[in-house]
Amino acid sequence: TKSAKDMHDEKGNRAFLFPGKVPGYEDYFPDVDRINPAYFRNLDKKIDYLNAHGFTPFIEVARRDIGPAWKKYYQWPQSYTRYIQYVWSRYQANNCFFSPIHFDWDGSLPADDWNLAANKVIEKYGHSPFGTLVSCNPTGSSLENFGHTDKAKWLTFHQIGNFHHRDGHGHRSYHLLTDIFNTAPALPAINGEPYYDGQHETVPGSPTAALYSRSAMYGSVLSGGLGGHIYGAGKEGTEGGAMWGGNVEPAANNKIWDGIRWPSGDQMRHLRTFCFVR
């Protein structure tokens, strides 16, 4: 890949300690039973900073890539359940959304494995005492991946996702929001990965990119995504990362703060007026 990023924080810490337990890869795959307190102390400051400036972080405890080795070489699902609970407990007093897994592609562990670990959090510890909403970034739809609340006890709002870059036809996923809208009991739903400003050969920050962003925003909400909308900016690769890649490096063409200031981001504020007009 040409877009891999260093996983260390600004102090050189990573989330878990080394060496790990995967034979031959002890220096590559960490010991996921041993979290690194220094990493999370730095993360505390970042979450507090975001909250202080009006941002609500969506905290997904892990990305699906880590699953196969975790399950094979560590106690599953108990080990992963403990880790989910650790992260959720640490930030449950912050203004956040939670997720037990970034499941944007199913080429990892089956959804049932992740669901088992997340359900055990609820069975053993219960839901967050402050009502923190929980969902996940799915491969298509959280409803399709994990089922409704009868099967996914941890779910308190649904998402669709990972359709923003498929042949330029993000609108093909709108029916997934309508399916969620028609479930009972009702849960909020959002398009967690709509069109991102700068994708599909558009110039980042251009009128065309803003047009596509508006189309995704209103199309999603009118299709049943009444939980609101997420703004995305940038595309895969080093040439256009912006918010997509969390780009802050000097060599990046588009950085986080560039994407936030593009016209499509400013136009998000009109959605509230549209939804609540009388």
Image: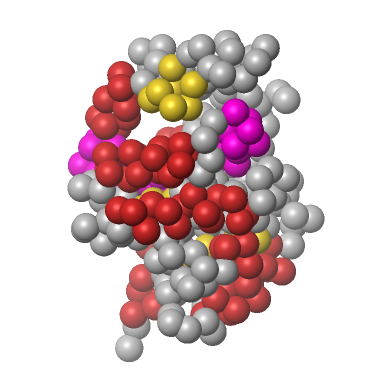
Colour scheme of the rendered structure: secondary structure
Classify residue 249 as left or right of residue 107: left
Q: Nearer the viewer, residue 244 or 4?
A: 4
Query: How far across and how far down the image is residue 224, in percent?
Result: 52, 78
Quarter of the figure that contains the N terminus? top right
Q: Residue furthest bottom?
A: 278
Q: Over which residues does the magenta segment extend?
A: 47-73
Q: Residue furthest right?
A: 167
Quarter of the figure that contains the C terminus? bottom left
User: Which residue: 49% across, 64% down?
Assistant: 152
Is residue 45 depicted above or below 235 in this figure? above
User: Which residue: 51% across, 29% down?
Assistant: 247
Is residue 168 depicted above or below 273 in this figure? above
User: Which residue: 36% across, 13% down?
Assistant: 11
Query: How far across and how far down the image is residue 91, in percent?
Result: 27, 43
Residue 61 forms part of the magenta stretch:
yes
Query: How far across and how far down the image is residue 183, in percent?
Result: 52, 82
User: Which residue: 42% across, 72% down?
Assistant: 188
